[in-house]
Image (cartoon, rainbow, N blue to C red):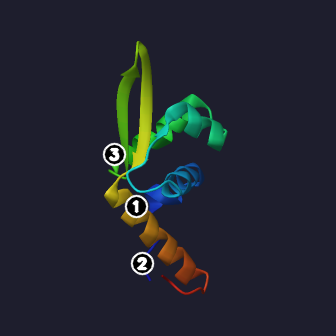
């Protein structure tokens, strides 16, 4: 059996990926909202998002609403596929049926 993806497997990154996977495809969430949902510090969330962005699992978009900068995060197509593969491997490891 293949190993679990170490980029996703870290607890904080698994929580991030799970939260993003719960959104509709091509939907995003603002950085402050994701921070609130996950109850993470801005620095901790930024660090883990950088790892996920480097792996091309998430897309980070920086924009402005008026003069206020806003950062949006969304799961990329490859990130969604990687998360689905991760979940299939986890189910197999736990003795469940993969989808």
Quarter holding residue 1? bottom left
- Report the Cα–Cα distance between label 2 and label 3: 22 Å
Q: Earlier in the sequence, mark 2 or mark 3?
A: 2
Comparing marks 1 and 2, which lies closer to the viewer? 1
Quarter holding residue 14? bottom right
Q: Earlier in the sequence, mark 3 or mark 1?
A: 3
Q: Disc 2, disc 3: CB below 8 Å? A: no
According to the image, label 3 marks what residue? 54
Rendered residue at 58%/36% (across/down): 33
Residue at the farthest top position: 67
At mark 2, the secondary structure is loop
Report whether 38 appears left or right of 77.
right
Q: Nearer the viewer, residue 99 or 1?
A: 99
Which mark identifies residue 49?
A: none
Q: Nearer the viewer, residue 8 or 21?
A: 21
According to the image, label 2 marks what residue? 2
What is the crowding at mark 2: few (fewer than 14 residues within 10 Å), some, or many (at least 20)?
A: few
What is the crowding at mark 1: few (fewer than 14 residues within 10 Å), some, or many (at least 20)?
A: some
Rendered residue at 53%/57% (across/down): 22
Rendered residue at 45%/41% (across/down): 49
Q: Is residue 79 above or below residue 54?
A: below
- Report the Cα–Cα distance between label 3 and label 1: 15 Å
Q: Earlier in the sequence, mark 1 or mark 2?
A: 2
At mark 3, the secondary structure is helix
According to the image, label 1 marks what residue? 80
Q: Where residue 23 sits: x, y (%)?
A: 50, 53
- Report the Cα–Cα distance between label 1 and label 2: 18 Å
Residue at the farthest front position: 66
Report whether 60 appears left or right of 29.
left
Report whether 54 appears left or right of 35.
left
Q: Where residue 40 sits: x, y (%)?
A: 63, 37
Q: Where residue 99 sits: x, y (%)?
A: 48, 82
């Amino acid at each position: 059996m293949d190993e679990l993806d170490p980029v996703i497997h870290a607890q904080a990154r698994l929580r991030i990926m799970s939260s993003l996977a719960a959104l509709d495809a091509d939907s995003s969430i603002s950085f402050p909202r994701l921070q609130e949902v996950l109850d993470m510090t801005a620095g901790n969330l930024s660090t883990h998002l950088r790892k996920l962005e480097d792996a091309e699992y998430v897309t980070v978009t920086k924009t402005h609403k008026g003069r206020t900068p806003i950062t949006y995060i969304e799961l990329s197509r490859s990130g969604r596929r990687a998360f689905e593969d991760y979940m299939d491997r986890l189910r197999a490891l736990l003795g469940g049926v993969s989808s």
